[in-house]
Image (cartoon, grey):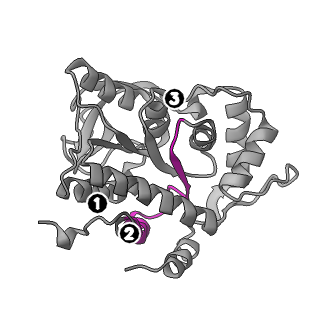
Amino acid sequence: MLSTGALRAHLLAARLAGPVATSREESLRSYRLFAARDPRVLLGLDPEWGWDEGDLLRLMAQKCGVSADPAHVSGPDVIDPERTLAALEAFAARLGETARARAPVLFGTGHPHRLLEFYASLAEALSAVGCVVLTPAQGAGVDVATRFGVRRHSLDYVRGVALVREGGARPPGSATGAHTHSPLPVRIALGALAEVGGPLPELVVGDHGWVCGAGQLGVEAIGLADTDDPALFVGEAEGRVSVAVPVDDAVRADYYLPLTRYVLDRAGLPAAQEWP
């Protein structure tokens, strides 16, 4: 069992919280783009409220612990580990409720190189207690906007976690995929389920467009978000995202393992060695 104090120490040592690799400049740029309703940072969310840069900065200070001072414009951004811990508790509680209800769940990530193992461990634990981990529309084409223009990708699943990969880049099932903020994959996955009559997920777990895209469609969603991802926190404030956990989402993949252990324990879910 990982104590709260031990996890707090790990968050700071691994720079998952405290001063993080995401720069203040990156975060402020995202807030400017969000205020301008740029789809690259809306992540599929259509905000109901009018959010200007000042509103977003105050929200992110409240939710993440970044500086609320608009004159602070450079250097590393900061995540308050206490806010991360509190959000992880809420995240784990929602997973525990899903497990007890044996509810269907959908996992998806736009950060497969960093977060695949985190989500896959949760998916496998939920499956072990009787939840259906959904894998709809495998192989479906997805047009994803990249820095090189729109590129055709395909939807794939690795250990129950959805990701997208460029056509021909890797065989299906390989544990790599493309980094994306797009909400199109979750829209395609949910659309495929609706077309065949379900079951629809009672919870979507992930990041980026997977969370905001699902929440915008009225499906409950929880996930991880960095300081330059204001959309998840806006979605939480507006009631369309249930839990947004503030954490650096691009550190080494193995640095998330203590978070996995902590969440499984708090959710009352079995670790791998306890699965039947």
Could you classify mark 3 by the number of other residues whose Cα lies within 10 Å: few (under 14), some (14-19), or many (20 or more)? many
Which residues lie in the magenta part? 240-263
| Mark toward the start of the polypeptide (1 vs 2) | 1
Quadrant position of the N terminus in the picture: bottom left
x, y (%) of residue 177?
33, 44
Residue type, label 3: Gly
Q: Position of residue 159 (x, y in %)?
A: 22, 51
**How far apart in space, not on screen, are marks 3 and 2 (Cα)?**
29 Å
Mark 2 highlights which residue?
257
In-image side of 187 versus 30 (left or right): left
The percent position of residue 81, horizontal first and vertical second, equals 61, 68
Left or right of residue 16, residue 75 in this image: right
Q: Are marks 3 and 2 in contact (CB under 8 Å)?
A: no
Exactly how many numbered labels are in the figure?
3
Tell me the number on the disc at residue 59: none
How many residues crowd mark 2 within 10 Å: few (<14), some (14–19), many (20+)? Answer: some
Depicted 150 relative to depicted 8: above or below: above
Image quadrant where one finds the C terminus:
bottom left
For this rendering, which residue is in front, 208 or 62? 62
Q: Amino acid at mark 2?
A: Leu
CB contact under 8 Å: marks 1 and 2: no
Mark positioned earlier in the residue sequence (3 or 1): 3
Residue 241 falls within the magenta-colored stretch: yes
Question: On the image, numbered disc 3 is attached to which residue?
Answer: 44
Which of the 4 image quarters holds residue 77?
bottom right
Q: Residue at x 41, y 33 (%)?
A: 219
Q: Earlier in the sequence, mark 3 or mark 2?
A: 3
